[in-house]
Image (cartoon, grey):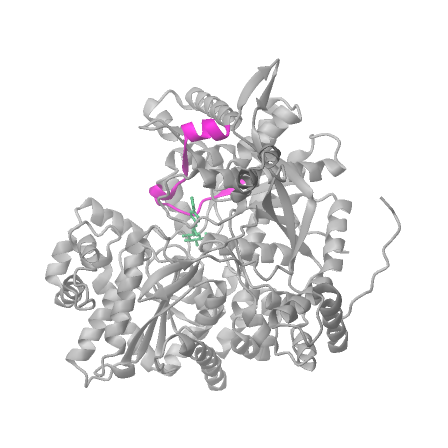
Amino acid sequence: MTTVDLEFDQLNSTVDALRRSISNRMMYGVGKDAVTAHPHDWLHAAALAVRDRLVARWMKTTRLQYEQDVKRVYYLSMEFLIGRTFTNALLALGIHDQMRDALASLGVDMQALTDIEPDAALGNGGLGRLAACFLDSMATLGIPGFGYGIRYEYGMFRQEIINGEQVEAPDYWLRAGNPWEFPRPEIKYMVHFGGRTVQRGEQVEWIDTEHVNATAYDTVIPGYATDATNTLRLWSARATDELDLGAFNRGDYRNAVDTKNMSENVSRLLYPDDSTQAGRELRLRQEYFFVSATMQDLIRRYQRTHSTFGRFSEKVAVHLNDTHPVLAIPELMRLLVDIHNLSWDKAWKHVTQIFSYTNHTLMPEALETWDVEMLARLLPRHLEIIFEINAQFLKHVSEQSGHDAEMIRRISLVDEYGQRRVRMAHLAIVASDKVNGVSKLHSQLMTRDIFADFAQLYPDRFTNVTNGITPRRWLAQASPSMSSLIDQHIGSHWRSNLFELEQLRNLRTDSGFIDAFREAKRQSKLRLVHRLAHHTKLPFNPDALFDMQVKRIHEYKRQLLNLLHVIVRYNQIRANPEHDWVPRVVMFAGKAASAYRMAKTIIKLIGDVGQKVNHDPLVGDRLKVVFVPNYGVSVAELMIPAADLSEQISMAGTEASGTGNMKLALNGALTIGTMDGANIEICDAVGRENIFIFGHSADEVDDLRASGYRPRQVYEENAELRMALDQIRTGFFSPDDPLRFSDIFHTLVDWGDHYMVLADFAAFAKAQAEVDARFVDKRAWTESAIENVAGMGQFSSDRTIGEYARNIWHVSSLNLE
Ligand code: 26Q
C-alpha cells in the first residue's frame, strides 16, 4: 500500500468540459469513436462522464464518515426499485442542461439516450420503490446510510400484453453493461448453507457446509444539491470454486459447470410477490445469502476503527424493510457469539438496540413464515439460535404476565399448529428496538389486530412513520412542465423543502396561474398521448379526464370496482347517447404476479372491456379504456404527470399506505379514494373538499363482515350493477369464450366478495358523478388540483427519513464542514 496522493483532474461541468469528458470516456472507456458508436455507447460514455463527477463527493463523504466516527444506518431490503439513473444524477449535480448541450454539440439527442437506459427494476412495487426514495432522501439529508441488497441479474419481469393477456418476459437489465456500478471483486464473504452443528466446549461450530461467495457491487447515491453521497451495495453470488475440479478432471465438463451455476443461482432473479407464497427454498437462500454478507461487511467496517465491540450498538443501526431480511438477527447473533466470542447476553443486548423493523402489510396470509424442517436443513445453527431466542422470550413473558397458555401459543416465534413454521415477523419484533407501520391507520390497526399481544407487552416499541416519496424524481424529473411553472412562481427550493409548495395556495385564485397550471398538465398529457400512439392505435382526446389506476394488480386494490363502474358508464352512454357526458380516458397499468390467476384474469377483462368500449361508434371519445403495458418506474414517470384523477380505492384496512397516491397528488391529480392507508392523511392535508372520499371505513368493513355481508343481495337490488355483472358472466365482453370471466362473477356475487367490491359500488359511482361535475367546472377543478400540490409537503420522503433518523435510528447528519 502506498500513501502517495493521487494526482487526478478536477472535473468541472461546463459544456466544453463535459464534451471533452464524454469524448475521453468514449475513446478510453468504451473503446469506440464517433463513427462506430451505437446509441448505447453514447449513453455509456455520457453516464461515465456523469459518474466521474460524483466520485470526488463520494470519497469526501466516506472520509468524513470515518473522521467523525459516525453512527451508520444499514437499510436492508430485498428490493430496490431504482429505475433510471442518468437524468436523476444530472439533476442532483445540477448539470442537466450543460449535458444536453454537450451531447447536442456531439450530434447526439439527449432525450433519445435517456429513453434507452434500462430501468434498474430490482423490486416488485411499493416496498421496493420506497427503499429507492429512502436512499435518495438519506443522501440528500446527509444521513450516513447504506442500502444493502441483491444484485439480481434478472429484475422484475417485463410485461407484454398479447391478445389482452399478460405474458412475462425476462428482464436481463445488464445486457448492455451497467455504467453506474463499481464491481468490488476484492470485497467478498463466504456464505454457508446446510451441514450440522457440533458443540466444542462452550462454543458451537457449524461444519460440513456448502458455501458460496458474495461479492460487492457499489453504486453511488448522490444527494440533491449537496456534496453528501451514499452507497448502495448489492451482492452477487460467485462459486467458491471456479469449477468442480473433480468433475472437470474426469472430463465431465457438463457437471463441472452445473455445480458452479447452481451455487450462483442464488442472486439470479427477483422473486415476484405472490402474497400467499409457499416458501421456496431458493428464496430462503437468497434472504440468508444477502444478510450474511451484509452482517459480515458491517462488522468488518466497524472493526476498522474499533478494537472491541463495546460501542457496537452506538455505531450501527440496521433497518429491516419488512421481514425479508430478518435472518440478519440470528446471523448477527451467530457472528458475535460463535465467531467473535461475545457472550450470548452481551450479543443479545447489542442486537436488540441495533435492529428496527418496518411492517408493510396487515394481511395475515402475506406474513412470512418458514418451515422448521427447511430451516433445519439449510440453516441448522440459525434454527438453534431462533429456538434459544424463543425460549428466553417465552420464559420472560411467562414470568412477567403469568402463564397464559393461549397467549404464549399466539406470540411464540414458532407456529405449532400443523407443520411447524417460524414466524418471521415475531422474530423481528422480539429483536427490534422499534417497529413501525407506514401510515397512521396502518400503525393503529397493526397494534390493534395482527400484533396486539406484542403491543401489550412492549407498548413503547411500536410507532408510526408515514411513508413519503422523493420530490426530485416524482416532480422535478417526471414533470418538467409543472416543475418549471412552480419554479417561476416560488423558486426552486421546494426540491429540498417540499413544504415550500404551500406558497402555491396563494396562487389558487390567480387566473394567470390557473391557466398556466392547466397548460403544464396538458403538456404532460400530450407527452403521454404521443408515447401511447405507438402502442394503441386509438385517438385520445387530451382534454378528456385522464383517470388512472396504476399499481400492482391485486384483488384488494379493487381494479374490479373501477372496471365495474366503467361498464356501468358504458351502458349509460349507450342508453342515453344524447346526454352531455364528460369525456374520460380510463387507464390501468400494473403487473400481476405470475402465479396469481385471478389478477391475470382481471387484466384480460380490462382488455376485453376496452375492445368493446373503444370500438363502439356510439361511444366515440366519451369513454376510452386502456391498459398500458409494463408498468414500472419509467412508465410511472410518464403516466403520473398526465393524470387528472387518481384511483386509490382499496378496501379500507388493506392498503398499508400506498405511495402512488402521493405521487399522483403531487402532480396535481385529484384522488378518488377510500379511507385507507395514507389516503386519510392526504385527505387531511389537501382538505376534504379537494378529494373524493367514498365507501366503508375500516371499522365499517369489520362491522359489515360481523353482521353478515351478503353480496348477492347487493347484486339483486342494484339494477345497473346487476347488468354489468351479468354482462361479465354471460360473455358480453368475451363472445369468443363466454365463460372466460364466470369466476370473476362468482367471486363477487356468490363466493363472499372478500374485498367488498359490491358493498362499495354505489358509493363509488356517486363519488364518480361528483368527479364529473367538478371536472366540468375547469376553474374549480384546477383550484382543487393546486390545493393538492400545495398540501403535499409532508409526503416528501425527506420528512419520513427525518423521523426515522430522529426517533428510530438515532443518527444525525454528517458534518460536511
Ligand atoms: C415475499 C415472499 C416471497 C416472495 C416475495 C415476497 C414479497 C415481495 C414483495 C412480499 C411483499 C412484497 C411487497 C410488498 C409491498 O410492496 N407492500 C407495499 O409497501 C408499500 C410501502 O410501504 C405500501 O405503501 C403499500 O401499501 C404496500 O402494499
In the picture, the quarter occupied by the C terminus is bottom right
Front one among 770 and 308: 308
Please state the horizontal and vertical placement of residue 581, each as a whole percent of the image: 25, 81
Specify whether 555 is left or right of 95.
left
Give above or below for 137 relative to 307: below
In the picture, the quarter occupied by the N terminus is top right
Q: Is residue 79 visible?
A: yes
What residue is rendered at 55% in x and 65% in y? Answer: 473
Please state the horizontal and vertical placement of residue 727, each as a whole percent of the image: 16, 66
Please state the horizontal and vertical placement of residue 568, each as a whole percent of the image: 20, 70
Front one among 453 and 378: 378
Please provide the residue range marked out in magenta.
356-379
Specify whether 46 is left or right of 207.
right
Specify whether 57 is left or right of 380.
right
Specify whether 431 is left or right of 299.
left
Q: Is residue 118 magenta?
A: no
Front one among 219 and 504: 219
Residue farthest to the right, as pictured? 4
Please state the horizontal and vertical placement of residue 766, each as a whole percent of the image: 24, 69
Residue farthest to the top, as pictured? 201
Give above or below for 622 relative to 273: below
Q: Is residue 765 visible?
A: no
Give above or below for 355 relative to 504: above
The quadrant holding residue 500 is: bottom right
